[in-house]
């Protein structure tokens, strides 16, 4: 028997609340809030003698960017004083910063508790270590290594090329067992990795699992810490690349540089002193629009070949040869309007880079120029083998022109080769140095328990001083190498954000620029913004709104108001958070059913259309939509008549046909992915049938605990057996308990309808129409692929014929009685009950299973859900 419990789990993710999604907030709340609640359930029948909850002094300090972490720890403090029987005597210990261990120390070291590294057989990586699911790959670069020595500016600065970062990521993914294809998304270069002559520089690349993929961070070592070099997100990709018709491409272009038998000079060699491995360009073609260096469709084609003397690099294990790929993605700079060979251009970011296979010795590069604006260039690039099979697809490669001496390497418009700490580290370094010594931990904990107090704070730092410091810093975060600062004197007057979109964008500005107060008319560049910060700003916008904007947008829309107007012009009017909570109104375009629940992004898989339950409202499915994928678009299908004066559909077939009309405006052709919650699963199944009858393919129908239309009713005998069982369990108290529950149910039912109507919902009418449609729905056998997700079976009462009845007084069936009607049925059990399976925290398991299944459906495969859950 367990008698004593220490709950020390927790996670922190600093960011302003406006910059966080609800899913990210739930990630921070989960260990302390959901974890504690689950422990209370586990020990309800076998109470503990003592429980110790590890909270944090953040509840007193209220550090910037930690509102969710603060709330989670205050929850533990509240539990300590709540007298929960399952926990026995409870002590909440609010620990301060520790000097050698803990979250703060890990934030500086990147995790000191990682186990001993083991060797890895990769050309640029030496070792790997793993802890808590995160993998860290270690290595070092010497000034004599060809990847450094052969990539120098004309002024002699030797640095890792951007494609070197991509190669490090590729080798790390290969060492971790990741199979092709995969994609790097929102790859952003933060600082140059420079190696001085005669020296070496250690680096580490960390892969950390996240809900939306795997986070990648490349850092380089300095004497007093680590400097971030690049960050990205790794996701899955389609199984195979397509094929380009290279002959057709050449036929519509003119020869720019014909093959000569030796390497051609590349566009960047005006400012770069490349070594022999970079001499790979063999022939080039330009599209007709490129002749005057104008037009939106400028394109080029190039053949490239690694010299025979360098083939050993590929045999050694290089995946995306950095020199070959550097020229393959940058050879067409001459297509940029007004390109000057005397100017150095450096990479800022890749929107997405999808890798289907390693690069061979010979590749073909098809470059399309995006409109970039003054000082910026944007490219899409497809790399193929000589037969046209696509190997690498690049979307949104953005480069920045440097207008000063390349020797300074102005990646962020300021010299930045020697940044000693990440943003906000200086204060943290001091706090950790003065933190609680680890050796004192056991004695301090023992003294806390002996005090008999339900809540204590233990800190080696003066809390009033820390509180005062945080108050002075206000809610703004430290950024760059300086502290947060007041709004400067600007020509524009301060204008407060007027809606949620402006408030969100102003929050992005505050986080990135460190300005405590941002008005909607305040210019990005006037507040100290520059190109590198702009890259991160647009990555945040893409994540939040699924909108891909070029950096030059900031010249067109340089402040919050203009940027918000531009965003709305692309994605439609944005309703406020309050109104989305109250009533998800029809989206722009006059749709009755469709509600955008996840914006998604290009390349994220087919959209998913999910039908609301029998009350017609998709609000309870919001957490599922967010957890499914940040890339896959998710559309909710609400019932007609939920709002306004339209009458609900009288049959499920009519409702399905009406939904299909709107679905095909978003996705004209199949295969389709359709889902439905509870009674909405019936409409989803009918949508699948009607689409198939119309000649459209349906990749998958997902039913979330959907019952058959008319479930068997309890017999009189079984009702009597249930009453008898309750009487045996509870005795005479059964009757008083039954009466209390009946009265409470009636009160709740009478109160629910007026509240729904006051919020604009016509729940009662939708529910009545749904119940009226059930007897009229004719079940038909279907051979299409269906997965039924349902919670654990609630076998509350055993009745006649060996059957079981649930607490909700319904017969229990393993398959919800669907097997006779569906020949291709898969049944999956997930945590929670009928309602909570789609809510936090249970929705995490459901979403993980569905992510794997939907990805497999995209590719026409099946998936083992035991593996998917892992």
Image (tube, helix red, strand yellow):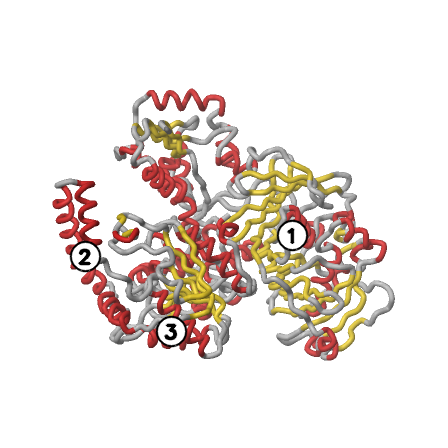
Label located before the other in sequence (3 or 1): 1
Callout 2: 10 Å neighbours few (<14), some, many (20+)? few
**Depth-wise, is mark 2 or mark 3 nearer the camera?**
2
The residue under label 3 is: 659
Q: Is the C-beta separation of discs 1 and 2 under 8 Å? A: no
Q: Position of residue 617 (x, y in %)?
A: 31, 64
Q: Nearer the viewer, residue 449 or 791?
A: 791
Report the Cα–Cα distance between label 2 and label 3: 40 Å
User: Which of marks 2 and 1 precedes in the sequence?
Assistant: 1
Determine which residue is flagged by label 2. Answer: 716
Vertical position of residue 75 compared to residue 164: above or below = above
Which residue is depicted at the point 66% across and 37% down? 118
Q: Which mark is residue 410?
A: 1
Percent x, y for residue 271?
A: 75, 57
- Mark whose residue sits in front, 3 or 1: 3
Q: Is residue 158 visible?
A: yes
Question: Closer to us: mark 1 or mark 2?
Answer: 2
Dot 2 lies on which element?
helix
């Amino acid at each position: 028997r367990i008698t004593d419990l220490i709950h020390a789990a927790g996670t922190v993710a600093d960011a302003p609340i406006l910059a966080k999604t609800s899913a990210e907030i739930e990630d921070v709340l989960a260990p302390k809030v959901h974890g504690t609640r689950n422990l209370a359930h586990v020990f309800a029948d076998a109470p503990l003698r003592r429980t110790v909850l590890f909270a944090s002094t953040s509840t007193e300090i209220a550090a910037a960017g930690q509102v969710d972490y603060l709330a989670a720890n205050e929850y533990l403090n509240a539990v300590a004083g709540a007298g929960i029987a399952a926990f026995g005597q409870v002590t909440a210990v609010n620990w301060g910063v520790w000097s050698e261990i803990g979250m703060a120390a890990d934030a500086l070291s990147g995790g000191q508790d990682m186990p001993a590294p083991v060797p890895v057989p990769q050309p640029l990586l030496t070792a790997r270590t793993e802890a808590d699911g995160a993998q860290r790959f270690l290595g070092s670069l010497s000034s004599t290594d060809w990847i450094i020595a052969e990539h120098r500016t004309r002024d002699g600065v030797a640095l890792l090329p951007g494609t070197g970062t991509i190669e490090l990521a590729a080798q790390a993914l290969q060492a971790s067992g990741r199979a092709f294809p995969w994609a790097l998304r929102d790859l952003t270069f933060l600082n140059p990795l420079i190696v001085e002559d005669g020296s070496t520089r250690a680096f580490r690349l960390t892969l950390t699992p996240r809900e939306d993929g795997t986070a990648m961070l490349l850092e380089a070592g300095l004497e007093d810490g680590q400097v971030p070099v690049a960050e990205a997100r790794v996701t899955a990709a389609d199984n195979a690349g397509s094929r380009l018709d290279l002959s057709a491409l050449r036929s519509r272009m003119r020869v720019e540089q014909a093959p000569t038998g030796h390497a051609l000079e590349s566009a960047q060699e005006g400012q770069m002193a490349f070594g022999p491995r970079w001499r790979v360009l063999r022939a080039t073609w330009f599209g007709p629009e490129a002749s005057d260096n104008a037009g939106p469709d400028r394109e080029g084609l190039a053949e490239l070949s690694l010299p025979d003397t360098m083939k050993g690099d590929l045999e050694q294990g290089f995946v995306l040869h950095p020199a070959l790929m550097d020229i393959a993605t940058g050879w067409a700079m001459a297509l940029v309007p007004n390109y000057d060979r005397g100017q150095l251009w450096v990479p800022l970011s890749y929107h997405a880079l999808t890798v289907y296979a390693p690069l061979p010795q010979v590749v073909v590069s098809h470059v399309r120029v995006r409109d970039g604006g003054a000082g910026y260039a944007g490219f899409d690039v497809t790399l193929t083998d000589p037969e046209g099979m696509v190997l690498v697809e690049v979307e949104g490669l953005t480069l920045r022109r440097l207008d000063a001496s390349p020797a300074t390497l102005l990646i962020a418009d300021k010299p930045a080769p020697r940044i000693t700490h990440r943003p906000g580290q200086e204060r943290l370094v001091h706090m950790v140095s003065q933190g609680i010594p680890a050796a004192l931990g056991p004695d301090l904990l023992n003294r806390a328990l002996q005090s008999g107090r339900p809540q204590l704070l233990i800190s080696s730092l003066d809390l009033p001083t820390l509180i005062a410091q945080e108050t002075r810093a206000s809610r703004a975060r430290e950024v760059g190498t300086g502290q947060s600062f007041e709004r400067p004197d600007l020509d524009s007057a301060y204008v407060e954000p007027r809606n949620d979109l402006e408030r969100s964008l102003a929050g992005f500005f505050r986080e990135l620029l460190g300005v405590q107060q941002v008005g909607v008319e305040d210019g990005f560049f006037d507040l100290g913004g520059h190109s590198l910060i702009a890259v991160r700003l647009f990555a945040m916008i893409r994540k939040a709104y699924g909108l891909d904007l070029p950096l030059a947008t900031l010249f067109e829309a340089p402040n919050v108001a203009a940027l918000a107007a531009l965003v709305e012009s692309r994605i439609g009017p944005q309703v406020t958070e309050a109104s989305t909570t109250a009533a998800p109104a029809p989206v722009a375009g006059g749709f009755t059913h469709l509600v955008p629940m996840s914006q998604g992004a290009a390349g994220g898989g087919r959209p998913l259309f999910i039908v609301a339950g029998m009350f017609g409202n998709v609000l309870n499915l919001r957490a599922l939509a967010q957890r499914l994928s940040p890339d896959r678009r998710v559309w909710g299908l609400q019932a007609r008549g939920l709002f306004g004066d339209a009458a609900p559909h009288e049959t499920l077939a009519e409702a399905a046909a009406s939904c299909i009309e709107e679905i095909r405006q978003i996705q004209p052709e199949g295969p389709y992915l359709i889902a439905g919650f509870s009674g909405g699963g019936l409409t989803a199944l009918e949508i699948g049938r009607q689409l198939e009858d119309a000649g459209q393919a349906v990749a998958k129908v997902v039913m979330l605990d959907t019952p058959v239309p008319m479930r068997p009713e309890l017999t009189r005998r079984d009702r009597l057996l249930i009453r008898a069982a309750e009487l045996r369990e509870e005795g005479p108290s059964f009757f008083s308990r039954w009466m209390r529950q009946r009265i409470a149910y009636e009160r709740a039912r009478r109160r629910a309808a007026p509240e729904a109507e006051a919020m604009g919902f016509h729940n009662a009418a939708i529910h009545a129409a749904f119940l009226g449609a059930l007897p009229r729905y004719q079940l038909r056998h279907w051979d299409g692929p269906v997965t039924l997700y349902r919670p654990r079976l609630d076998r509350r009462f055993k009745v006649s014929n060996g059957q079981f009845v649930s607490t909700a007084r319904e017969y229990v069936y393993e398959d919800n009685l669907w097997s006779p009607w569906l020949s291709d049925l898969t049944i999956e059990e997930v945590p929670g009950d009928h309602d909570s399976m789609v809510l936090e925290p249970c929705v995490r398991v459901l979403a993980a299973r569905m992510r794997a299944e939907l990805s497999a459906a995209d590719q026409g495969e099946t998936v083992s859900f035991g593996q998917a859950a892992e």
